[in-house]
Image: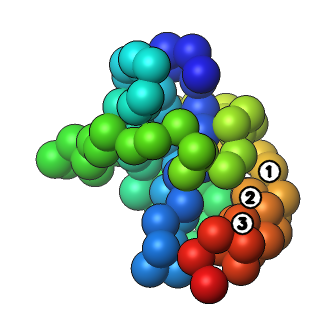
Amino acid sequence: MAVDQWVAVGYEDDKYFVGQVERTNDENVRVNFLCKSATNNFFYWPQVPDKDDVEANVIFYPKVKVVKSGRRYEVQDLDNIISSYEGFSRKYFN
């Protein structure tokens, strides 16, 4: 992982989040997460930052394609992320 890299992180409660790597060390990665818009593939930064220190092995999609459009961010490979999360979740969380 590299600082500023866009990633998708999987959680056990049937959720995944897209964010940007802020910091890495040998065991953990700090990710600053975006919020998903309700209607499309656009995301935005929440008013209160949503950050988490995660183990690198829960980053199931390490090269998310994100394009900034004004104050919004478009995740161009969202269908692939959803598909990858479904497989990741079945393998590691069931």
Of tags 2 and 3, the one toward the viewer is 3
The residue that disc 2 covers is 81
Instruction: Measuring from the top left, give residue 86's x and y in whole percent.
Output: 73, 75
- Badge 1 marks a residue whose secondary structure is loop
Q: Which mark identifies residue 47? A: none
Q: Residue 1's quadrant in the figure?
A: top right
Mark 1 = which residue? 77
In the displayed structure image, the side of residue 34 where residue 85 appears, left or right: right
> In the structure shown, which secondary structural element does the residue marked by tag 3 occupy?
helix
Q: How is the image coloured?
A: rainbow
Q: Position of residue 40 (x, y in %)?
A: 63, 67
Name above or below for residue 20 compared with residue 88: above
Q: Quadrant of residue 57?
A: top right
Q: Is residue 79 above or below residue 43?
A: below
**Three-letter amino acid code at the position of disc 1:** Asp
Q: CA distance from mark 2 to mark 1?
A: 6 Å
Q: Nearer the viewer, residue 11 or 80?
A: 11
88 on left or right of 33: right
* Residue 62 lies in quadrant: top right
Residue most extreme to the left: 48
On residue 88, which mark appears? 3
Residue 87 in the figure: left or right of residue 22? right
Q: Position of residue 80 (x, y in %)?
A: 83, 59
Tell me the residue at 44%/79% (across/down). 13
Badge 2 vs badge 1, beta-carbon distance below 8 Å: yes
Left or right relative to 78: residue 56 = left
Q: Spatial distance from mark 1 to mark 3, Cα to Cα?
A: 16 Å
State which quarter of the image contains the C terminus. Answer: bottom right
Q: Residue at x 71, y 66 (%)?
A: 88
Work out whether mark 2 precedes mark 3 in sequence or the reverse, and give the earlier one: 2
Q: Amino acid at mark 2?
A: Ile
Q: Amino acid at mark 3?
A: Phe
